[in-house]
Image (cartoon, grey):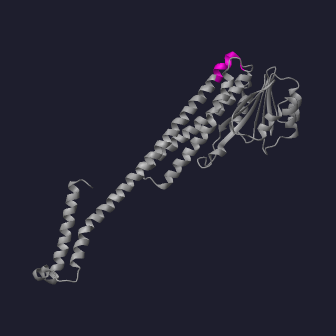
Amino acid sequence: MIKAIYLTNGIITIEYDAGKILEDYRKKPDLIWIDIYLENHELSQEETMILSELFKFHEMSVEDCLFPQYYPKMEEFENYVFGAVHGIQLKPHYFKEFEDSIYELNVFIGKDFVVTVHIEELFFLETLFEKVKARPQIEMKSLENLLYNIFNKVVSSYEFTLEKIDDKIESLEDDILKDPETEIMEEILDTKKVIFAMKKIAEPQQATYFYFTRANNNLISKEYLVYFRDIYMQCVTMNQSILMRSQMVVNLLEVYMSSVTVRLTEVMKFLTVIATVLMPVLIISGYYGMNVKFPENFIFGDRGLWLFAMCLMLVAIIAMFIYFKKKKWF
């Protein structure tokens, strides 16, 4: 699916037909943005003509669009720059299958055009396209402004995901303090996996965005360099935030293990007290349970001996409880 929006002498034009876009671009609009959504991971014949014949993009760049590598890159060619950046569009159950939420956005940038290609529907591009339609003089007043809006949305997607991770970590902390069940361990490991996946794609992004902060850049005018430095700094800050969350999850795992150990210690302590308290009972019952006549038989008789043994057990239990209480063992 293809769509284009372009400015010619201050007049905005929107087009959804590839053949018409091919024809209109030859009229040299001031600025054009073409967005191609590869629904079946394939380019139509007309879309291929636009990329390969109209703009003369290198076949390796076009191939990267069809087979995403999920590794950022920025390549400079004679008449354009090709970039592959990555963002996050969260899907249901993303903590279990986070890698499905990572998308690759391929961008071709020239003096008077921006071409975006992606293999899944990106809602932020739809929103940006509608904003450009409503306010073309603001959103498409320059190539740099359009490019900044696209890159800014990609980087911002990480911040939204980090907010979700913060909420998850806070929830896990509360659950650990209440009752450290096995399911919590699984959730901690899922969160750790999410952060690791973010770190894997976020760290290399810095070099990609750094390209647009160079003073000798042929595409970005000096007055707009500050905007792209802002995006680069967002990326740097984002990586620092990811590292911090990574350490938080490690600490969370340690707290969980400590909680489990404390809980196990309490159980063992309880069982030890029960076993210790019952020890005199077992000794006394074993002693008087032997089939022999004890001196106590002559003193208390058979019935009295049973009462004597029961009282002896009770006194021993009470004495041990008093001793444990003084030692503050419970």
157 with respect to 15 (left or right)? left
Q: What x and y, as percent, mark residue 21?
A: 85, 31
Q: Quadrant of residue 299?
A: bottom left
On the question of residue 37 being in view, the answer is: no
300 with respect to 328 (left or right)? left
Question: What residue is rendered at 61% in x and 46% in y?
Answer: 94
Relative to 181, say whether 114 is above or below: above
Nearer to me, 296 or 149? 296
Question: What residue is rendered at 50% in x and 39% in y?
Answer: 247
Relative to 83, say whether 267 is above or below: below
Nearer to me, 23 or 274? 274
Find the residue positioned furthest to the left.
299
Relative to 208, say whether 325 is above or below: below
Q: What x and y, as percent, mark residue 126?
A: 72, 36
On the question of residue 304 being in view, the answer is: yes
Residue 12 lies within the magenta run: no
| Dominant SS type (magenta) | helix
Q: Quadrant of residue 1?
A: top right
Question: What residue is rendered at 53% in x and 52% in y?
Answer: 186
Q: What x and y, as percent, mark residue 208?
A: 68, 29
Nearer to me, 84 or 50? 84
Q: What x and y, as percent, mark residue 161?
A: 58, 39
Nearer to me, 225 or 92? 225
Read off the magenta span: 220-228
Q: Quadrant of residue 30?
A: top right
Find the residue positioned furthest to the front.
292
Find the residue positioned furthest to the top.
222
Residue 227 lies within the magenta run: yes
